[in-house]
Amino acid sequence: MTDTTATAIAVLAALAAAASFGVAAALQHRQARLTPDAGGVRLLAALAARPLWLAGIALAAIAYGLQALALAFGPLSLVAPIVATDLLFALPVAARWSRPLRARDWLGCVLAAGGVAAFLAAAPPSSGRSDAPVRDWLLAFAVVGLVCVLALAAGRLATGPVRAALTATAAGAVFGLTAAVTLSLTRLLRTAGLGTALAHWQPWALIALGTTGLLLSASAFQAGALGASLPVMDTVEPVSGVLLGTLLFGEQLAASPAGFTVQLAGAVAAIAGITLLGRYAGTPGLRTAAAAQAGAGP
C-alpha cells in the first residue's frame, strides 16, 4: 500500500469519525442536560435509562472504531485535528433545539475547516514510529493525570460554564491520550494480531481511559451548555494529540519557518472557528429548550 493510499484512508476514516462523534456529542449533551443533577456512577446510571443517550453511546463507539481505523493508517498529528471538527457536525443536530445558523456561525465553520486544512497541508508526510519507550508512556500518563487533577480540583470551586469548561479540559486531555494509546494498539494489531495484542497493556489501558473519558464528558455536558464544553474538548484533544504524537511517536511538525507559520496560523484559525461555533452551541435558545423539556424524557 502506498503512502498516498494510506493517507487517503486515514483522512476519510477520520472525517467519518468526526461526523459520528459530533452527532453522538449532541445527543449525549441533550440527555445529560435533561438528567437530574448527580455525580459519578449515579450520573451514568441515570443516563443509561435514556434511549437517546444510549444511541449516542452506540454512535460514539462506531466513531471510535473509525478513529482507530484512521490511526492504523495515519499519524496522530493528522487524525487528531480532523476528528476535532466534530463540532461542525454536532451543530445541525443541536439546531433542532435552537436557532438556525447565522453568518457568524458559518464564519466559524469556514475558519474551523479552513484552519484544519491549512494545518494538515503544511504537515510533513511522516507517520513516525509505531510505539514508544516505557519511560515516555509513563511521562505521558503522568502529565495527563496532573492536568486532570488540576482541572477537576479547580472545577470543584466553580459553577456553571466554568465548571463545564474545566471538566471538559480534563476530558479533552484524556481523549488525546486515548487516541495515542489507540494508535499504538492498532499498529500492534496490524503486526502481531489480536491474541498477542491482548497480552499487552494497551487494551486494558483503553478500557480505563474510555470509562474515565465517558464519565468526564458526561459530567462536563451536564454542568453547562454545549458551547461551554464541546469547544474546549475540541481544542484540548487535538493539541494533546499533536503533542503526544511528537513525544511518543516522533511525529513532526513543519520544519521550515514558512511551513510552521502556516501550521500555527491554521491552528489559530481553527480554534477561533471552534470558539465561534461554541457560542452558537451555547445560545439561549438551546439552553431554554433543554430546560423546558427537563424531565420530559428523551
Image: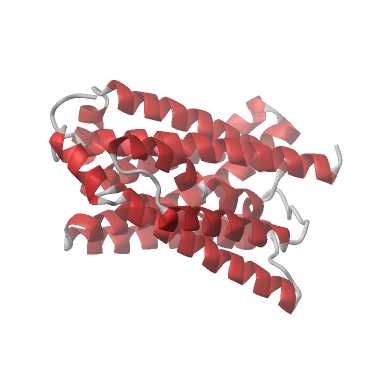
Q: Quadrant of residue 255?
A: bottom right
**Residue 94 image offset from top left, x and y in percent:** 35, 39
Closer to us: 16 or 63: 16
- The structure residue drawn at horizontal position 58% and vertical position 35%, both measured from the top left corner, is 16
Q: Position of residue 260 (x, y in %)?
A: 68, 72
Which quadrant is home to the N terminus? top right
> Is residue 19 in view from this perspective?
yes
Q: Position of residue 157 (x, y in %)?
A: 16, 63
Q: Residue shown at 34%/24% (left/top)?
A: 54
Colour mode of the rendering: secondary structure
| Residue 219 location (% of width, % of height) | 26, 45
Relative side of 39 to 14, left or right: left
Furthest-bottom residue in this view: 257
| The C terminus - image quarter | top left
Q: Which residue occupies 77% across, 41% down?
A: 6
Q: Nearer the viewer, residue 298 or 95?
A: 95
**Residue sitting at x 18%, y 62%:** 158
The single residue placed furthest to the right in the displayed view is 2
Can residue 170 be seen from the camera position used here? no
Is residue 138 shown left or right of residue 15?
A: left
Q: How many marks?
A: 0
Among the 4 quarters of the image, the one containing residue 103 = bottom left
